[in-house]
């Protein structure tokens, strides 16, 4: 934590207003990104883009993604360091970043993702663009802890909660939000995880209940009887997507367990469960070379990384081996693609304050 404090203390808040893509249909305060796996068509260079699954186009506009991911790393890192080191100045710096993103009229982000993962010649934004805001989930958890220690209060607390309340409503009611909820595979898990985290911050029990219903009725049934994830295995990066989804499942259950501790034990009528899925994946968390479903077409060399799933699930299921695996994993990946798929960096913030 001393290292985190030194690393992030001098960070200046930077929001999406620092850079605007001329291709965006939104304004200065509207988040914008472009679909990862979409490329110019060699047969029609000026026409609609075509999809190349698992291959990220380096010419895409990614500045807002970078800003949001960096914001999450800094705000969560400062909060965790402030709590661990009992340093109020770090907490106040974290609040400054929240203020810039959610309150200051000059720099705040509008609480929607209408222009996330646009595709040239096809659409100005997509529901699956909501995966980009998984990095705000840990920001919401940090805000809860900042409130508890008295660093986030008054108008700042009202402003941050108001922003997340509006974004949560957009996730649950907008056409793009509903599309993400109903998409299936890791995208539906992503939606539920965000809803759970944001609902904890704004104390929205109805949203918590909606996430639990989705988890029981539609997310667990996506798992195979043996614990594998067929919808992730069919991708060109089966390792990445399987463990990314496992991480989302773990974060979802961890957040829901604040009010519903039994969520870890939920099963379908035919026995599909998080425990079975975790047991299936545990041997490969620290051993990607042994993964039995084939190597990813890209980025495989950057694994393993310190996923939080073995910590959360190991604790929930009383699995000492999982906790040892978590401790052995290398933290703080430097590759941006791996960072993008590693939304939890300060797992202490995912436990209720005081625990």
Image: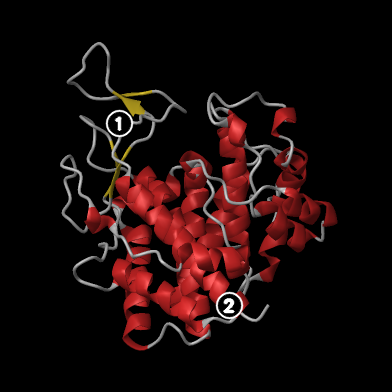
Q: Quadrant of the N terminus?
A: bottom right
Direction from residue 22 to residue 227 in the image, left or right: right
Q: Residue 168: which quarter of the image? A: bottom left
Which label is found at residue 59?
1
Q: Residue 308: which quarter of the image? A: bottom right
Task: Check disc 1 and report its element: helix, strand or loop.
Answer: loop
Task: Check disc 2 and report its element: helix, strand or loop.
Answer: helix
User: Residue 179: percent from the left, percent from the top?
Assistant: 37, 47
Residue shown at 36% from the left, 69% from the top: 97
User: Residue 30: percent from the left, percent from the top?
Assistant: 23, 55
- Quick one: 218 or 42, which is closer to the camera? 42
Direction from residue 223 to residue 26 in the image, left or right: left
Q: Is residue 77 above or below residue 40?
A: below
Structural distance between the alpha carbons of marks 2 and 1:
40 Å
- Quick one: 278 or 61, which is closer to the camera? 61
The answer to whether residue 339 is seen in the rendering is yes
Residue shown at 49% from the left, 79% from the top: 146
Q: Give the crowd class for mark 1: few <14, some 14-19, many >=20 residues within 10 Å.
A: few
Q: Quadrant of the C terminus?
A: bottom right
Q: From the image, tell me which residue sits under label 2.
A: 83
């Amino acid at each position: 934590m001393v290292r985190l404090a030194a690393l992030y203390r001098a960070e200046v808040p930077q929001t999406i207003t620092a850079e605007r893509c001329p291709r965006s249909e939104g304004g200065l305060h509207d988040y914008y990104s472009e679909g990862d796996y979409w490329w110019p068509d060699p047969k029609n260079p000026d026409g609609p883009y075509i999809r190349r699954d698992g291959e990220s186009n380096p010419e895409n506009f990614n500045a807002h993604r970078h800003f949001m991911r960096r914001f999450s790393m800094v705000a969560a890192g400062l909060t965790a360091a402030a709590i661990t080191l009992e340093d109020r100045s770090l907490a106040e710096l974290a609040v400054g970043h929240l203020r810039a993103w959610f309150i200051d009229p000059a720099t705040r982000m509008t609480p929607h993702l209408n222009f996330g993962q646009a595709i040239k010649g096809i659409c100005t934004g997509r529901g699956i663009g909501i995966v980009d805001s998984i990095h705000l989930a840990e920001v919401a958890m940090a805000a809860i802890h900042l409130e508890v220690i008295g660093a986030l209060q008054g108008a700042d607390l009202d402003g941050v909660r108001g922003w997340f309340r509006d974004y949560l409503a957009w996730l649950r009611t907008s056409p793009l939000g509903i599309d993400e909820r109903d998409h299936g595979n890791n995208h539906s898990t992503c939606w539920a995880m965000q809803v759970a985290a944001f609902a904890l911050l704004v104390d929205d029990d109805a949203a918590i209940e909606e996430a639990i219903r989705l988890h029981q009725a539609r997310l667990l049934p996506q798992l195979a009887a043996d614990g594998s994830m067929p919808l992730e295995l069919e991708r060109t990066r089966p390792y990445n997507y399987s463990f990314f989804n496992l991480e989302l499942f773990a974060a979802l259950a961890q957040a829901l367990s604040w009010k519903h501790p039994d969520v870890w034990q939920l099963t379908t009528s035919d026995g599909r469960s998080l425990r079975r899925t975790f047991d299936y994946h545990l041997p490969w968390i620290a051993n990607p070379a042994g993964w039995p479903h084939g190597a990813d077409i890209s980025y495989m060399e950057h694994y393993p990384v310190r996923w939080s799933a073995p910590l959360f699930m190991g604790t929930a299921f009383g699995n000492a081996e999982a906790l040892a695996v978590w401790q052995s994993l290398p933290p703080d990946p430097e590759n941006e693609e791996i960072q993008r798929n590693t939304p939890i960096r300060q797992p202490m913030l995912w436990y209720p304050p005081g625990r």
